[in-house]
Image (spheres, helix red, strand yellow):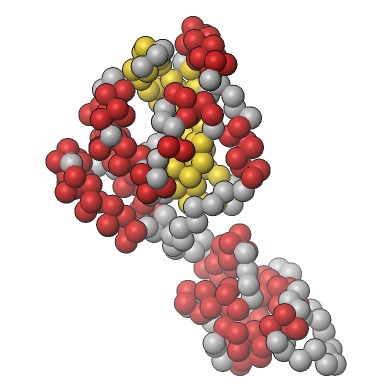
Amino acid sequence: MYPQDGNPLGTFLRDRRMRLDPATFGFPTGRRRTPGLRREEVAQRSNISPTWYTWLEQGRGGAPSADVLERIATGLMLTEPEREHLHILAFGHPPEARYRPENNITPRLQRVLDAIPTSPALIRTVTWDIVAWNRSAAALLTDYAELRPDQRNILRLVFSDSRVKAAQEDWLSIARYVVGAFRADAARAGASAEIRQLVEELSLMSAEFKTLWRENEVVGHGDGVKRLHHPELGVIELEFSTFSVDGRPDLTMMVYTPATAEVAGRVQAFIAKQ
């Protein structure tokens, strides 16, 4: 057993190796001195030298490259938090962002949205696709269920949907903010390649988007105020806040809350009738 504080990277690798069942990977289970995979089996799964992997567990041979560490993370079937921890132990910082689109959410996360009855709430990806929403969002913002999945994108709606455009009291400011925050999100998540097609599409579709994209503005997003012209409620003022979804760095929750008691009363009455 290695000392916990003397070789934390090796200790972590050994611990995760010993938790794996050899039979799961087609290795003979026979007589083994210790549980889990052997070092050479991890090396085989990771496509690296058994000697190099052994040295890594023993704290010899220097620091591995990021590529080798990624292969080991795959070979050990590490979860995303475990992969991040592995990089922190090896290099002192989390791994470089890599975007992996997953448009599904858990039923538990949907129930969180549904538990906010009179505040529009939705979940968006780093490419600003809407993947979940609550009843209030459908009533006050957009009924995303009526749109095809590829149309449930905030940028497409802002720049191509006349109803969405007309609902914004200051459309240009909203559009500039959306483009700047979208650019920051995509870069932070390592999704630059994924947004290229969307940017090209929007640039051909909208001269306004093309101009704003060329300005290269980047803005942070956290909270603010949005004034909407609702067809039945008239002008309503909503405060919006954004929240990271723990364990899903590709997802952001946005919640719009009535800015005043008067607006809240009108919204509650309207939602109750839906």
Dividing the picture into quadrants, the one containing residue 58 is: bottom right
The answer to whether 118 appears left or right of 149 in the picture is right
Q: Name the quarter where the N terminus is drawn.
A: bottom right
Give whichever of 107, 252 is nearer the camera.
107
The answer to whether 174 appears left or right of 80 in the picture is left
Q: Residue at x 52, y 74 (%)?
A: 70
Q: How far across and down, in percent of the image, does residue 101 sit?
A: 46, 58
Regarding residue 11, the answer to whether it shows in the image is: no
Q: How far across and down, in percent of the image, does residue 111 sit?
A: 64, 37
Residue 19 vertical position relative to residue 93 in the rendered view, above or below: below
Q: How far across and down, in percent of the image, does residue 144 sit?
A: 44, 37
Q: How far across and down, in percent of the image, does residue 39 sit?
A: 68, 87
Q: Residue at x 36, y 17 (%)?
A: 231
Give whichever of 103, 85 is nearer the camera.
103
Residue 181 vertical position relative to residue 261 in the rendered view, above or below: below
Q: Residue at x 37, y 57 (%)?
A: 191
Give whichever of 148, 181 is nearer the camera.
148
Regarding residue 48, the answer to whether it shows in the image is: yes
Q: Residue at x 67, y 88 (%)?
A: 41
Residue 187 vertical position relative to residue 169 in the rendered view, above or below: below
Marks counted in the figure total 0
Dividing the picture into quadrants, the one containing residue 147 is: top left
